Amino acid sequence: MSAATTRSRTPDRLCAEAVDLARAVAEEVAAPGIVGEHDGMVSEGDRVVTHYFACKEMGYRGWRWAVTVARASRAKIVTVDEAVLLPGSDALLAPEWVPWSERLRPGDMGPGDLLPTDAEDLRLEPGWTGEDEPPPNSAVSHEMADLVEAEDAEVTAGPPAELSAVPARGTISAVAEELGLSRARVLSRYGLHVAADRWEDGYGPKTAMAQAAPAPCVSCGFLARIGGSLGQAFGVCANEFSPADGHVVSLAYGCGGHSEAAVMPKPPRVAPPVIDETRVDPFPLRPAADSGSVPAAEDQDSAELGHS
């Protein structure tokens, strides 16, 4: 029978009675007024007991001070093993720690922040940097040296073929750099698929905006095409009034700002006036006296003077 099974779970009497000793140790470790009432004890083994005291520290709801005391065999003096602050069953705990690489979300980066990428990032794959260019004595290298010699005959002191190294302008890596191929890593097929799924979730055909759109972006005049394989399914919106302005959108996406959704009608043109020059229309300056109309202002004034 093992030693663990022979241990008694009944608390040792002297250790169980050492409540004042355990409280004094807890108060010595904690700040004044933090240790609360005695909250029970647990037998850890033969002559080993842990006393629990409530914690009054703000922000540590449900935590308890645990003081473990022990007594040597046939000894009457109880000693202290350790005193720690432990969470209880209903303790307020911090959330489980998550690595920063899993906590990071789009939009979290700010000015000056650096985001390292793993060397084995599945979204990237090695690009062409010119490291596998032919050795200096190969036929391709001599051909490049001849081309450089013809271009730099007036610049170099001797022919480039006699130099210790081929000039940078004649190397494959220089040509690759000029064509934009000299990146250490490029997007892998997995990285392309992940980006495509993410863009389609935000601005794809299944969004509410696209479902209510009169037509897809593929026929919109505000769509700016992009190159590469992603250009077969995505573009960039250039409509300042669209909710997707400046964003990569699926060609199947759409919104109410489609260039051909509603064409503004032209304002009606008023017909020019028709002037009949064959007749003369009289326009009297004053109305006739018997027409019953109100007399002119000056006629009314003269009438008032005559009555006066």
Image (cartoon, rainbow, N blue to C red):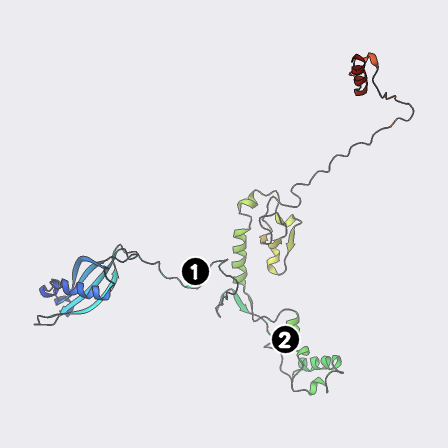
Q: What residue do we see at 61% from left, 54% from top?
A: 236
Number of marks in picture: 2
- The spot of residue 111 in percent (x, y) is 53, 63
Query: Few, some or many C-alpha atoms within 10 Å of disc 2 (few <14, some 14-19, many ≥20)?
Result: some
Q: Are marks 2 and 1 in contact (CB under 8 Å)?
A: no
Left or right for 129, reference 88: right
> In the rendered structure, which amino acid carries the disc numbered 1?
Arg
On the image, numbered disc 2 is attached to which residue? 173
Judge depth for marks 2 and 1 and give the one in front: 1
**Quarter where residue 229 is shown:** bottom right
Within 10 angstroms of label 1, few (less than 14), some, or many (20 or more) residues?
A: few
Q: Position of residue 127 (x, y in %)?
A: 57, 70
Q: Residue at x 69, y 79 (%)?
A: 144
Dot 2 amino acid type: Ser
Q: Which residue is mark 1?
A: 103
Residue drawn at the location 53% of the way across and 51% of the way down: 202
Q: In the structure shown, which secondary structural element does the residue marked by tag 2 occupy? A: helix
